[in-house]
Image (cartoon, helix red, strand yellow):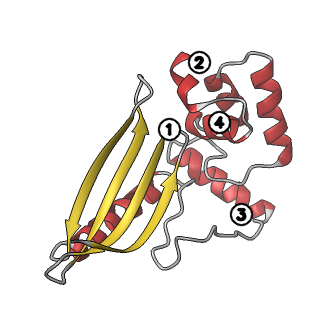
Amino acid sequence: MNEQLFSTKVSSNARDYFFDVKQCQNGSYYLAINESRKSEDGNSKRQCVLIFNNLLNDFAAAFAQSMQKISNLDSTIVWDPRNNTKKRRFRDKTPAEIKHEQMLNKRNGRPKNSGLRWSDEDRMKVTEFFKQGEAVAAIAANLHRSVPSITAELMKQGLLEEHSLSSKPF
């Protein structure tokens, strides 16, 4: 019988992921990653991936490389393999540093404020524009941010739900 030694869970609105460390009868270890999601008929669907001990290091390395690439592509995602369980705190940037970041963003074809901290004023503007019926793309253009950034902020504020994204005009 396989023994479960450790379990942790990651949840989102529509899915739950379970990471279980187990030990086989022969003494070897493996990681079981289970995804549980609700289907349209209301039933739960589960999928499982098993990563056995001979591939755990390769799997971890591939995951770390993938996360590093994603964090390089999207400045809103911070990947620190040494301590990825705590949210990172950033010092406030000086106006000169902000101006420099904005210049780099424009040079690299990103919105001017991409990856920069949100001000309370910008959060209020997002709310106002959205309640006035502005499209997400228009809000993004007005605030010099990306559409995913505006969408994420609207979801954080509870003004937009994940399942309603397909019906919203962008």
Image location (x, y in percent) of residue 131: 79, 21
At x 69%, y 27%, the residue is: 139
Q: Earlier in the sequence, mark 1 or mark 2?
A: 1
Residue that badge 3 annotates: 97
At x 30%, y 71%, the residue is: 60
Which disc, if any, is residue 14? Answer: 1
Image location (x, y in percent) of residue 7: 43, 68
Q: CA distance from mark 3 to mark 2?
A: 35 Å
Q: Estimate how packed mark 2 is, as few (under 14), some (14 to 19) or many (20 or more) residues with alpha carbons within 10 Å.
A: few
- Please say if 82 is above or below 121: below
Number of the front mark, 3 or 4: 4
The C terminus appears in which quarter of the rendering?
top right
Secondary structure category for the residue under label 2: loop
Kind of residue sitting beneath label 3:
Glu
Number of the front mark, 1 or 3: 1
Q: Nearer the viewer, residue 135 or 114?
A: 135
Q: Nearer the viewer, residue 95 or 118?
A: 118
Q: Earlier in the sequence, mark 4 or mark 2?
A: 4
Residue that badge 2 annotates: 168
Which disc, if any, is residue 150? Answer: 4
Number of the front mark, 4 or 2: 2
Kind of residue sitting beneath label 4:
Ile
Is residue 158 rendered to the left or right of residue 147? Answer: right
The N terminus appears in which quarter of the rendering?
bottom left
Which disc, if any, is residue 55? Answer: none
Number of the front mark, 3 or 2: 2
- The quarter of the picture where residue 154 lies is top right
